[in-house]
Structures are given as structure tokens and as C-alpha cells.
Amino acid sequence: MLDVIRKKAEAGERITKEEGLYLLQEANMLDLAPLAQEVRYRHNPERVVTFVIDTNLNYTNVCDAYCTFCAFYRTEKDADAYTHSVDEVMGMIGAAAEKGVTTVLMQGGLNPKLPMDYYSELVSETRRRYPQVHPHFFSAPEIMKMSQVSGLSIREVLEELQRAGLQSIPGGGSEVLSNRVKRKISRLFPKGKVDDWTLVHREAHKLGYRTTATMMYGHLEEDEDIIEHLDHVRSLQDETGGFTAFIPWSFKKANTALDKRVKVEAGPNRYLRMIALSRLYLDNVQHIQASWFSEGKKTGQVALHFGGDDFGGTLFDENVMQEAGFYNRTTVEEVKTLILESGFVPAQRTTLYEVLHRFDGSEAEAEKSAVG
Ligand code: SF4
């Protein structure tokens, strides 16, 4: 089967679900890497790996969805529940902007007390006070919640946020896009089913938003569910072309209701396989993100040789995985070094994957000749 897949990859042809399953279950890791790299270079011909200077903020941890895989949410009555005012959030964004952050990824729990105006104001005030910051706010479940609370349709919610200045949304809330899995991990199923996530992203793309697609694997899914997830993303991308990147990461189980049901967390081998599979299956998505954050810096570096062309963000603040006992931090300099050490030229990008600055040594030379 590998020869068939190799020929298809070389010819730029699409692989089937069965072939995807073979790559996930049986293909030799050392065969996967060069195959994925070949396709990576077709999409992104230069030996450049991009990163963004960003942070992850949260406006509330109050949530009434109670997902079994989540260690972040609190009920309104919990002593450590919080909901920040718009001004408080602006203070957090201001502090991030001072550190050079250009992207703020902001998500929160599904707080039924927050009105639509609150969300619009978060966007418009960010745009007004910090024009250098790109708001990358609100995942699909939050958009659904806004629709439910306000009585507006999904499209109307997205239109209102767009008028406030929102241009992109993150891919959170997809977990694994298979209703077999959603039924097992979501306490409110059929709320939050696959069609809800795809509906929000489809509507967003139709309005001109760009979004990312993500996948959190390593809990109660089967291999077939992973392939189903990739297939949903590939189909929607065929339809709209609105996904900028695909970002898989592994589930962290500490402090979640799934802790005892998931015996062992997925490790680096599974992650590298997932990156290569994503690159080969998603023939219509340009960027595959290799995460230094969720899988560790060394695994992130190796993932750049398994089809990843982007190293994610600096993530100066991150609370969701931290609640699940997972802590990892970096600096801009370290990100650049990690990319260089892996054999690539680091380049700073925007939220929408436009390259701002390549760190290929020419900036140092330019400085030298200016002094000379
Ligand atoms: S994952 Fe999101 S929606 Fe689910 S409980 Fe956590 S905060 Fe709420």
C-alpha cells in the first residue's frame, strides 16, 4: 500500500480513507517522514518555518458545558470562578502588546450570563486600543453560545463580530470530529455535535473569515475517528478554502473527568505520525503546525521533519493546559533557535500566515553595513 500512497503523493493525488488509516496504523515512521516532507515542500517550497508572537488569554472560566476532557471550567459558585470586565481584558491585552505580541488568541467558558455586546466590545476595544494586535477570538462553541443567548443566528453573530473587527477565529471545540466520540466525551451531546462545528466554520468562511482547524486526540477516539476528522476538514476546505492551518495536539488528562478512563497519554511517536498523516491527508491545507508547546520542544523540532512548516506561537500566557497539569514556556529567541537548530530559517508571521520578517542572517548583515 505504501508504494501506491507514495505514487499518489508524488503525483499530487488525493489519498483515500483506507490509505489514511494505513498511514496511521501501519506505515513505518521512517517512510512517513520523507513522504510528508515531499508534500510539505510542494505547499511551502522554501526551507522556512514560521512562528507568531502570541498569547492565549481567557475572559471567563465559567462554563455550563462541563466537558469531561476539560480541567479549565468552573461553575459560577466555585471560589476560583472569574469573569473579567472588558477593561480588565484590555489591561491583559495591553500587557501582552508591550511584550511585542501581535496575535491574541482568546477563548472562554460558555458563560450564559454574558450578553452579545460584551463579546463585540472585546473585539472593537482591542482594535481601537491596540491596532497592532490581531484578535483571534472565540471558538465555535462560544459562537454557538452567543447565538443561543442572543437569539441571533450563527451568521448574524459572526456578522456582528465582523463589524466589530474580528477577521479570524480559532479551531477549538472540534476535539475529534466524530459523533461517536462526541457522544462519549460531551455531557450535553447532541449539543456540540460535528455539524455544529462545521456550520460555524462554514458560515465564517462564507463571510470572509479565515479560521484554523484543530484536533485534540488521545482520549476515547478510535483510529477511524481520526480519519473521519481529517475527512471533515478536507471536505470543508474543498468547499470554502477558508482554513489557514491544521493544528493537532494530544489530550492532557490530569484534573479532568477522563483521567482514570484514559490510561496513558499519547506520546511523541503518535504525534509525529499525526503530523505526517495530516500533511498527507489534507492535500488542500497549506500549513501544518508543529507544536513545541503541547508535545515538548524536542518533539516539536522533529515534527518539522514530518511535514510541519509552522512552529505555532510563543504563547506567553496559557491557562487551559496548565489547569491539566501541563506547563511549558518559551521566548522569541528560543523559538528562533529551536527552528534554526532543526535546519530551517525562522520567520515571524501574522495570524493569517503572512511572513513579516525572515531571520536568515540578512538582518545582522544589514546592521553591520549600516554601521560600516
Ligand atoms: S472545553 Fe470549553 S466548553 Fe467544554 S467545559 Fe471546557 S471551557 Fe467549557
Image (cartoon, helix red, strand yellow):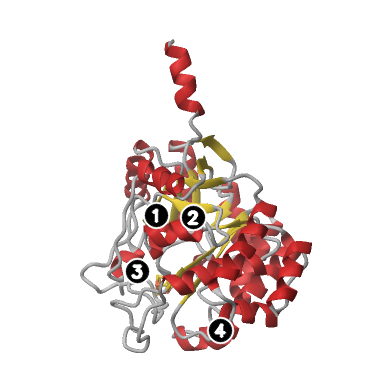
Secondary structure under tag 1 reads strand
**In the depicted structure, whether residue 288 falls above or below residue 363:** below
Element class at badge 4: helix
Question: Mark 4 against mark 2, which lies toward the viewer?
Answer: 4
- Which badge, 1 or 3, is on the more N-terminal residue? 1
Q: Nearer the viewer, residue 351 or 156?
A: 351
The reply to whether callout 1 and callout 3 are in contact (CB within 8 Å) is no
Q: Secondary structure at mark 3?
A: loop
Residue 208 seen in render: no
**Amino acid type assigned to the residue bearing label 4 in the image:** Asp
Q: Which residue is mark 3?
A: 62
Ranked by sequence position, the earlier of labels 2 and 1 is 1
- For ligand 1, the image quadrant comes to bottom left
Count residues near mark 4 (Cα–Cα under 10 Å), then give few for <14, some for 14-19, many for 20+: some
Q: Which residue bears the numbered disc 1?
A: 56
Q: Is residue 42 among the parts visible in the rendering?
A: yes
Instruction: Give the numbered dot on residue 248.
Output: none
Residue that numbered label 4 is attached to: 223
Residue 137 disc label = 2
Q: CA distance from mark 4 to mark 3?
A: 33 Å
**Alpha-carbon span between mark 1 and mark 4:** 30 Å
For the point 37% across and 75% down, the residue is: 70
- Quick one: label 1, few (<14), some, or many (20+) residues within 10 Å? many
- Direction from residue 112 to residue 179 in the image, left or right: right
Instruction: State which quadrant residue 196 falls in.
Output: bottom right
> Is 246 drawn above or below residue 353 in the view shown?
below
Residue at (55% x, 58% y) in the render: 308
